[in-house]
Amino acid sequence: MGQAIPRYEATAKVTGQPLYAADEPIARPLYAFFKTSGVARGTIASLDVRKAEAMPGVMKVYTHRNAPPRKAVKHIMTGGYMSDTNIPLADNRVRHDGDIVAMVVADSYEIARDAANRIEVRYAAQAPAATFGSPGAVKKVPEQAQKNAKKAGDFAAGWSRAPVKVDARYSTPTQHHNPIELYATTAVWNGDQLTFYEPSQFVYSTANGLAEQIGVDPAKVHLVNPYVGGGFGGKGILTQRTALVALAARDLGRPVKLVLHRKQAYGLTTYRAETRQRVRLGADRNGKLVAFAHDGEEVTSRADDYMVGGVENTVEMYACPNIATSVTLVKADRNTPGFMRSPPETPYMFGLESAMDELAVALNMDPVELRRINDTQKSPISGAPYTSRSLMQCYDQAAAAFGWSRRNPRPLSMSQGDWLIGWGCATATYPTNMMASTARIRLTADGKAVVEVAAHDMGQGAYTAMQQIAAKRLGLDPRQVTVRMGDSALPPGPVAGGSMTTASAGSAVHTAAGKIAARFGGAMPAPNDLDDAFRRLGVTQIEEYAEWWPPGQGPQAVRALYKGSMGGGGGEEGEQQEGNAGGGKPMMAAFGAEFVEVRIHRLTREIRVPRMTGAFAAGHIVNPRTARSQYLGGMIWGMASALLEATEVDAKRARYVNDNIAEYLVAVNADVPQVDVILVPEVDTKVNPLGVKGIGELANVGTAAAIANAVYHATGKRIRDLPITMDKLLV
């Protein structure tokens, strides 16, 4: 464990000093506002903008008749930059709810919004397909799903001879990010140089993608974004709005600022796709798994084959000789979904871990013991070993802290007054993803260092982690280290997603600091001797640049990084090592165990969660203080996902109903229980130079299943469709 020092930017944030993308002081800005569609599918039959154009202060109204052309850029999953390949204002078609039909640019935000509301649109609407089973929805098994399908042994044979079986279907809803910082873009041209300010989780990708889309040299595009007010995946990929704002600013010769209304964000940004899953578990009478199949269906847009594909993770969880998986996309008239915190793991682990609890009930076995019996130190698919896997240590420590041994396993057996009490548990997991990264460090003779890397801090503590990593390697007090991030003028860093920032950018920072130490013979001088050491070298400062890439990758990953590409993806599989009898690359992942108590009123079926306990093992923890905060937030999010969060979709009109922060329910203080977090020590020298596995997305993976399992224990009623609400318990 590293030092639990306070956050690098804590004082600045609580005193209101950081500037977010929409806060940047820009001289004489214009303001843009979108007019979005009132139908989910069809064409624009007529569009009257005369009232809007006549308003004082309106500079221009852009529609499909006069919108600046933009180049079609590939979707992120096909090697491009875009979160959605539907190009708004390219024609008169409407492709989903909230599609852009016009953009007003005016002297003030208020005028732009008022003018947008005065635009008169008449649609030739068509019946849209909203979701699973909708007329017109098309099923598709994309090539990537076929490629990623995991199989082992003979599932059909194993299933047929299994004496104990669970065959159940589960579903998870559409969910939207709703970060506190709204989605925004400010574009400023200085000749042919573009500077823009936009909340981004990957500035190099956003800048390079925008350059390609508007046809300019990437060297002339500069993205500035030192702070992100919540992203969770929704700010990870370039959206279509950015090019419209940038081109309007060039067209009008003045800076243009756009801040999306929260309602508009539902249709113009990504979200968690809804899933339907079938899980089949077959076991012998001792609880040993003999067959496992996980089949998923996911809703996506007509334009893009975005795929969650969480079965790739669930098949690696437990030892089983016979495995089969599949993923099918359902193409509907919706905007394209995308990454949302632990994108594949959160929905698909809900299905698996709920089914594991159902299997424990069928076997009359303790759920923890069932997982212990099927724990594995190697992949059931490839036979490759895990670099480290401390799942059962997590279960042991969490169960002891929670008091699991006092649980009466019989449903409806625990109560207090009118409240039924249920206890449940579930596994959390997240792969150790890594990307290439670079970093630059400048150390001066007075013992002060500046660390520069175009990584990102969305509140997870990345500034603090980079500060601590550099300080430790350079032998400095962390307060002597300044960190600069979130700017495409800095050396490129990884996407702030996949829980990879510390492992990736941190490894580059560690490497750069090591190169500085090498200038002094490999060992840093004591702080009091630093000035003399610089004098002997004949310099007043030392600057080193370093490149780092994950095991199994190479310099080409850094070249791809400079172009804004992920350069080969994450590193959940490490470098091939000698002596690996399984033949596959070693598996790298973090694990956790979550225990939950629910209380349900026997008459009203009101649901309360008074306490949760989570134990997590994720290699070296750079800062236990910020790590605990990440785990705490993840478990709270998982609770909200289980009980509250769902974007309601009008099945007839394919439109979002609760597209606002008032009706889209998230956890508030009154909902948050006692949350106990246990950091399980784990040393893993194989994953990266720091021994870091990644923590941010781990904790919300198992929470929903743990709550669903606790609800069953309390009531005897199995809820397989999230969110778990009172009405489902009253039926």
Image: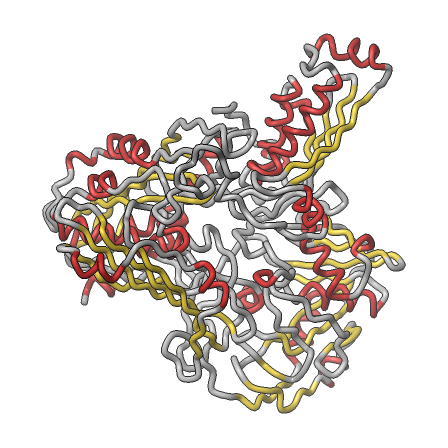
Q: Between 443 and 707, which is closer to the camera in this rendering? A: 443
With respect to residue 524, does 707 lie above or below?
below
Residue 97's spot in the image, x, y percent? 53, 75
Q: Residue at x 85, y 18 (%)?
A: 539
Specify whether residue 613 is in view: yes
Q: Residue at x 77, y 45 (%)?
A: 489
User: Between 254 and 167, which is closer to the camera in this rendering?
Assistant: 167
Could you tell me residue 355's position as x and y percent?
25, 55
- Count of residue discs: 0
Residue 688 sits above or below residue 124 on the image: above
State how the image is colored: secondary structure
Asked if one can make out residue 419 in the rendered structure from this viewpoint, the answer is no
Percent from the top left, x then y, of residue 187?
Answer: 76, 59
Q: Locate residue 76: give its quadrant.
A: bottom right
Q: Residue furthest right?
A: 191
**Residue drawn at point x = 58 percent, y = 37 percent:** 462
In this view, the residue in front, 234 or 46, is 234
Question: Does residue 620 appear left or right of residue 165 in this picture?
Answer: right
The residue closer to the viewer here, 295 or 349, is 295
Left/right of residue 141 with respect to residue 546 in the rendered view = left
Location of residue 376 (image quadrant): top left
Specify the quadrant that holds the C terminus. bottom left
Residue 185 location (% of width, % of height): 69, 59
Does residue 275 lie above or below 454 as drawn?
below
